[in-house]
Amino acid sequence: MKIPFIDLQKQYQEYKKEIDEQIAEVLESSIYIGGKKVTLLEEKLAKFTGAKRAIVCSSGTDALLLSLMALGIKKGDEVITTPFTFIATAEVISLIGATPVFVDIDEKTYNIDPNKIEEKITKHTKAILPVSLYGQVADMKEINKIAKKHDLKVIEDGCQSFGATYRGKKSCNLSDIGCTSFFPSKPLGCYGDGGAIFTNDEELALKIKMLLNHGQNMRYRHKYIGINGRLDAIQAAVLLIKLKYFSNEVKQREEIGKRYTNLLKDSDIITPYIEDDRSSVYAQYSIRVKNRDKVIEHLNKQGIPTAIHYPMPLHLQECFGYLGYKEGDFEVAEKISKEILSLPMSAFLNKEVQDDIVKALL
Ligand SMILES: *Cc1c(COP(=O)(O)O)cnc(C)c1O
C-alpha cells in the first residue's frame, strides 16, 4: 500500500481534459503574462470571497510582501504575528526591515491568541498579521476590534484557509487585506507558484497592482519601487478550471476532516478543534500525539506518509536569532510543535484509504 500525502494526481486526472485544453489555449495565444485569463480569474476570485478586489500574484509569500509594502510598512515598524506558522509569514516582515513581534497561540485552535495581543502593542506597531492555520480562520472579530482601537491594519494570512468561512463570510475577506497561496498542495493549488491578495479598498488594490509590476503606473513610468510579482497565464488557466470545482472540493474536504475526527474520537489522540462560528478547509488534518516519533515510524512502515507542520516555532529559528527570543518564551507554540502531526488529506481521499490510516493509528 502506498498512499500519497496529498493526492494531486487524482485531481488532475479528474479535470485533465479541461485543464489540458485551457493550457493549450494559452500556448496558442502567445500571451503568457497577463491577458484575459488573468483578468477573468481575478473577477472570479473576488466574487468567490465577496471582496471588491482580488489581485493575483506570484506566490503567497509575495502576496504577504506586497500587502506590507502597500500599507507602507517599513524599517522601524513592528508587525504582530504568530510564531506557529510557515516561515513566510514572519520572513516578509523582516525582509522589508520591520520587526516581527510574536504572540503565543491558543491551545485549542493553534491560531494567535487575541488575549495576548494588546500587551505587545507599542507606538511602533503598524499591523497585525494573523494566520488562519490548517484551514481554520483566526479569531478575526477580536483581532479587528483590537486593531480598530489602536489604529492598526490587519492582514489575514489565509494561505491555508482559502474557501473557509467565518461567521458566514469567506476567509481573505475579513480584514483590510487577505492573502492566499496557490502552491500546488494548498486547498486551491495551481501547477507552479501563485497567490492572491484581496481587499475592499480600491486605492490599496490599485497600489498593489502597480507594486507587483515594478511600481509601474504607465509603461516605463514607475511611481513606486516594486517587484516582479505577477501570476503567469498558464497558472491562471489552471486555476480557472480548478475554481469551478472548488466549492465541491471544500465540501468533500470538510466531510473527510469530520470523518477523521469522528473515527478518532474514542482514542487519546487530540483531533482538530473547530470553533462553532467557522468552517475549516483542512489544508492539513493535524492531530496531536505524545509519542510522535513512534507513531510516525509505525505509520510509515505501513506505507502511510505523515508531515509535521511545524517542528520548530519561528522564535527559535536561527534566522530570527537577532530578535533575542529564547526557549520558553511561547510555551503553547513550543508544546504544540512537539506533538503535532499531519495525516494524509485531500478532497480525493477515499473512505477505504482513510479507514486504513485510522486503523493504523488506533
Ligand atoms: C504556504 C504558506 C505561505 C507561503 O505561500 P507560498 O505560495 O508558498 O509562497 C505563507 N503562509 C502560510 C501560512 C502558508 O501555509
Image (tube, grey):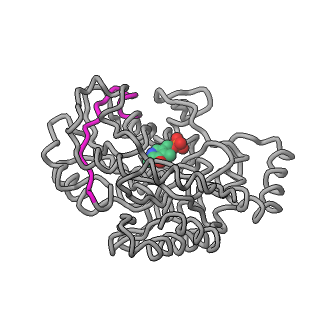
Quadrant in which residue 241 is drawn: bottom right
In the image, what residue occupies the spot 66% across and 43% down? 192
* Residue with the most extreme right position: 28
- In the rendered image, the quadrant that contains the N terminus is bottom right
Vertical side of 276 occupied by 57: above or below: above
> Left or right of 152: which side holds 345?
right
> Left or right of 31: which side holds 218?
left
Q: Position of residue 208 (x, y in %)?
A: 48, 42
* Residue with the most extreme left position: 119
In the image, what residue occupies the spot 41% across and 51% down? 292
Foreground pick, 83 / 6: 6
Residue numbers of the magenta segment: 92-107
Foreground pick, 40 / 119: 119
Whether residue 97 appears in magenta in the rendering, the answer is yes
> Left or right of 97: which side holds 183?
right
In the image, what residue occupies the spot 83% across and 52% down? 25
Q: Is residue 359 visible?
A: yes
> Left or right of 189: which side holds 180?
left
